[in-house]
Amino acid sequence: MIVILKKNPDQNQLDNLKRWLRSKNIDIHESTGVESTILGLVGDTTTIDINLLNALDIVEDVKRIQEPYKKCNRKFHPEDTVIKVGNTQIGGGNLTLMAGPCAVESEEQILSAARAVKAAGATMLRGGAFKPRTSPYSFQGLREEGIRLLELAKKETGLPIVTEIMDASQLDCFENVDVIQVGARNMQNFELLKVLGKTDKPILLKRGLANSYQEFLMSAEYIMAGGNEKVILCERGIRTFETYTRNTLDIALVPSMKQLSHLPIIIDPSHAAGKYALVPSLSCAAVAAGADGLIIEVHCDPEHALSDGPQSLKPDVFGRLAKKLYAIHDVMGSMEEVL
């Protein structure tokens, strides 16, 4: 249920309303916009009389929310969520470019990649320390050592770091990680999501390879229900009958999520394509569709990468792409102002 308040509501009446709602064991999520204030009510709202609320002087309207997701619902929070990370932000009209290798392989490799992507225009460094691989015989990542090397790269370049967690037991290793990534395979690992909901770090939540929009948002809801509202949604492609690409990028998710949710949405074109030659076009399409950012795999020597070399861009290619992406973003912003 949402309660839309009239402009400049009487503070005493508002305080009394909140106290009464809390006495009914209702959690209140307050969102203040330019024109109105919205109270999102979470809990057993069947005990709340809509007519009684509508009769209050400070109330403009009351609506029941049918969707099972509440906190990530745009109806609860009309304004876009902006998540600050280091000296940058995700959302709020900013284009975030996360770039780096699929896996951290060595100190020299990750430092070279960090310097290269920063020079090319990236605002955050991605790199896998704990690697979920389909085959148990594939490179599994450097684990804790990989986190340490990412921290070295962050110290040298100043780029905030994004890396994936696979299990709640690994959380202590992520103390100095700026954004914790939850991979597609763990999107519905609800026990992990509950633990991350108790942290205060931004969570990059990837959509599962066969999950609906509602299931995706319900996973975000798990994190937010725990108290952590710093959630970034990420579309990385879904599994379809097409075999030419690694996955199928669902570009319609971007405008759909902009309607359904207030959370920022970024695109992973590398995992969607599986082929480096397709990554630039998919990236441009994502920015044109309104994505708040991209997470792109970049490797200085992709032919010898220990993980996902065929979908990784070389730094010079990423540099040219970054310029194009920022230009598209500027044009789209100008068009919104005109329209």
Image (cartoon, rainbow, N blue to C red):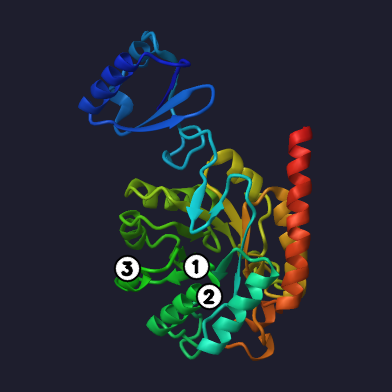
- Residue 226, position in %: x, y? 32, 49
Pair 2/3: label in front: 2
Depicted 55 relative to depicted 109: above or below = above
First in sequence: mark 2 vs mark 3: 2
What's the residue type where badge 1 is placed? Val
Q: Residue 41, how many percent across, how many down?
A: 36, 30
Classify residue 236 by image quadrant.
bottom right
Q: Residue at x 42, y 68 (%)?
A: 177
Residue 230, image x and y in percent? 44, 51
- Which class describes the residues within 10 Å of circle 3: few (<14), some (14-19), or many (20+)? few
Q: Mark 3 points at which residue?
A: 168
- Circles 2 and 3, Cβ within 8 Å, touching? The answer is no
In contact (CB < 8 Å): disc 2 and disc 1? yes
Q: Name the residue under label 1.
A: 162
Q: What residue type is labelled 2?
A: Gly
As drawn, the label of residue 127 is 2
Q: Is residue 46 above or below residue 163?
A: above
Q: Which residue is drawn at 57% across and 88% down?
A: 306
